[in-house]
Image: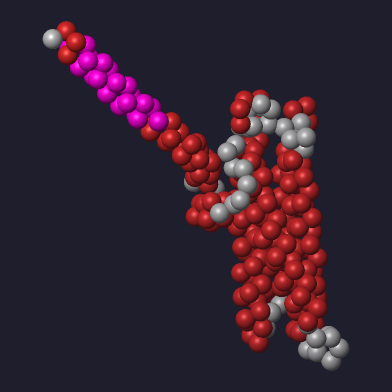
Amino acid sequence: MQTHFTLSLSTLLLYFLIIFTFFSSSTTATLPSNNHNEPQDLIHSSCIHSMYPRLCLRTLSNYVGPTNTTLYVAQAALKVSLAHAARASKYLKTLSAAAPDSSGQSPTKKRQRVALKDCVEQMADSVDELRKSLEELYHLRPETFRWQMSNTQTWVSAAITDGDTCLDGFVSNGGDNDGKVKREVKRRVTDVAMVTSNALYMINRLGQGDARKGKHRPGGGSGWNN
């Protein structure tokens, strides 16, 4: 009788041990999944108050790279903006190169050609300003943080202004025969302005946050990039 009781108790303990191990393994297995969702949660909380939330969520959710800190999110948004600006700049250069010579053209056509040339230059400036801004975010230092953030905000704002100037000059000088080209130029440049406005929001958010306290790198390390 005593042997039977001891055997039953041992079996019961083994049974509970198996159950405990199973649930411990299940809990551990879910941890990577929860950590994996953290970047998406940060993207959502960052985008929700941006100028164009849906566009922000769509572009950053598909971004391949680290987005688990506010610094990384700002860098990602700026990379997206730079990529869109570079594509628009390339399109405008191709469009300008294919435009016929202005000799013998009507005054309206000549103005269109000049406006397109100006637009090419302005979008090239935008690309340069966004590239400098991204480089600045990659080399932030605690002792120069405010100055670097001011530079970045100024350059990104200038990139938006360049796009506005491009549209003002090119669209206002277009004729009815160029409606399709005008619409495509407007679509591409407006797209750049929208993603760049979102990037500027992320940069402003970073500047108002805890970047100077070094809280933007996982594991509690410094948020500054070498």
Q: What secondary structure predominates along the stretch shown in magenta?
A: helix
Residue 149 left/right relative to 183: right
Foreground pick, 62 / 117? 62
Q: Which residues are magenta?
A: 5-25
Which residue is at 21% across, 11% downward?
6
Name, please, the residue furthest toward the left: 1
Name, please, the residue furthest toward the top: 2
Foreground pick, 71 / 209? 71
Q: In the image, residue 215 lies at what x, y percent?
A: 63, 28
73 is higher (above) or lower (below) than 178: above
Residue 88 left/right relative to 9: right
Residue 107 visible in the shown view: no
Foreground pick, 2 / 86? 2
Q: In the image, residue 167 lies at what x, y percent?
A: 68, 68
Residue 103 left/right relative to 46: right
Residue 189 visible in the shown view: yes
Name the image quarter holding the N terminus: top left
Which residue is at 53% across, 41% downward?
39
57 is higher (above) or lower (below) than 226: below
Residue 113 among magenta residues: no
Which residue is at 48% across, 36% downward?
32
Which residue is at 64% across, 67% downward?
188
Residue 18 among magenta residues: yes
Q: In the image, residue 66 lies at what x, y percent?
A: 62, 43
| Count of marks overlaid on the render | 0
Name, please, the residue furthest toward the bottom: 104
Name the image quarter holding the C terminus: top right
Could you say which quadrant of the image residue 72 lies in?
top right
